[in-house]
Image (cartoon, helix red, strand yellow):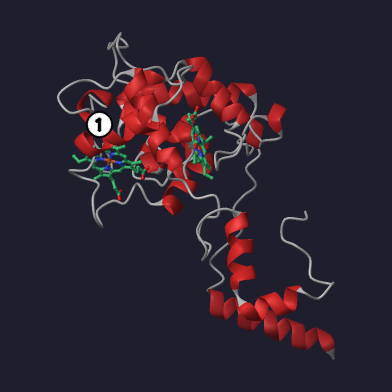
Amino acid sequence: MRAPIAAALLAACCLMSGCARHLPAMNDEQPVPRPQQIVSFDPLYGQNCSACHGSNGQNGPALDLNNPVFQQLMDDATLHRAIRDGVPGTQMPAFGESAGGMLTEPQVDALVAGMRKRWATEGTTRPAQIPSVTTTLTGNAAHGQQLFATDCRSCHSGKQQQVTDPTYLALVSDQALRILLIAGRPDLGHPGSQTGWQTVANGHAASDQDVTDLVAYLASLRSATPGQPYPGTADGVAQAVSNDPARTRLSAQPTTQSRTEK
Ligand code: HEC
Ligand code: HEC
């Protein structure tokens, strides 16, 4: 009795689907490439980078790779290393196979070459005075604070773009701030485009020391316990808890462990 039912069902399905559709013919001539064989920029960038760095390298939550000053700032080896090994302690993942990621060396090379082709301005040489991407100088936060007052407050004051917010600063590394101050973020409206670090400082180009001092100032405001109700360090939390009379009674019990015992 089962066969007629099955046949009837099949017929019904055929009627509903129109029966005119056939499975596509097997296409053995164009095999699907293995992920490791993809070396063209668009799929590599689209699948691995655009979620954070934005489609077409701008307007993403992480820095704009489509920024000619950024492209001048980074040499090929630095770009390659950043993609392969990531930036430890930040959201920038390690993509290279050697660092536990999924991309082969040729794929990392293809990403670097593709970025250059699309996003670097051809023929421009690296300006001699551009501060380097890393520094050996020591920052002076007090001088950074002065620079902030003259060069940044006009745009970053009150409720406008609160870049001095301790919790915001906990989300960005010193290195990311340094890159921002040198290369700018033209996509967001922070001074940038061709001039980057030149337009940030009031009337003069920011030197390596200026950039280092500004970063030191912003870093000095960073919260160690972002988003927690008691600003300050873990000690601040312990202090606030021990000031609460109800808690004092509780913490007198021998089972209560101190937060610092970890
Ligand atoms: C999960 C988010 C995320 C993804 C995905 C991501 N990045 Fe990043 N990337 C970041 C962040 C955040 C930073 C800034 C790191 C810091 O604070 O120094 C960064 C920094 C960088 C830098 C600068 C590194 C340096 O030396 O400071 C380069 C170059 C870069 N990313 C390229 C890429 C490329 C190419 C891809 C795709 C293969 C990619 N990123 C995918 C979040 C991401
Ligand atoms: C002409 C106005 C202007 C000046 C001057 C300016 N900024 Fe900005 N900045 C902006 C705008 C606009 C944004 C984007 C804010 C947003 O997306 O919410 C921004 C963003 C930022 C960010 C966050 C970038 C990110 O990735 O989200 C930081 C940090 C920053 N500025 C620091 C500074 C410092 C430090 C100075 C002084 C050296 C400065 N800015 C001078 C307009 C300015």
The answer to whether any part of residue 164 appears in the image is: yes
| Residue closest to the eye, 258 or 163 | 258
Residue 155 falls in image quadrant: top left
Residue labelled with disc 1: 192
Whether residue 89 sits left or right of residue 161 in the image: it is: right
| Residue closest to the eye, 246 or 55 | 246
Whether 253 is drawn above or below 158: the answer is below
Is disc 1 surrounded by few (<14), some (14 to 19) or many (20+) residues within 10 Å?
many
On-image quarter of the C terminus: bottom right
| Residue closest to the eye, 22 or 155 | 155
Residue 259 rendering spot, x and y as whole percentages: 72, 60
The answer to whether any part of residue 109 appears in the image is: no
Q: Tag 1's secondary structure?
A: loop
Residue 18 rendering spot, x and y as whole percentages: 53, 74
The residue furthest left is: 203
On-image quarter of the N terminus: bottom right
Whether residue 250 sits left or right of residue 75 in the image: it is: right
Mark 1 belongs to which amino acid? Gly
Residue, x 40% and y 21% (percent of image)? 116
Residue 216 falls in image quadrant: top left
Residue, x 37% and y 22% (percent of image)? 71
Residue 203 rendering spot, x and y as whole percentages: 14, 24
- On whether ligand 2 comes within 8 Å of the CB at mark 1, the answer is no
Residue, x 35% and y 33% (percent of image)? 142
Residue 102 rendering spot, x and y as whole percentages: 66, 35
Whether 130 is drawn above or below 38: the answer is above
Whether residue 53 sits left or right of residue 261 in the image: it is: left
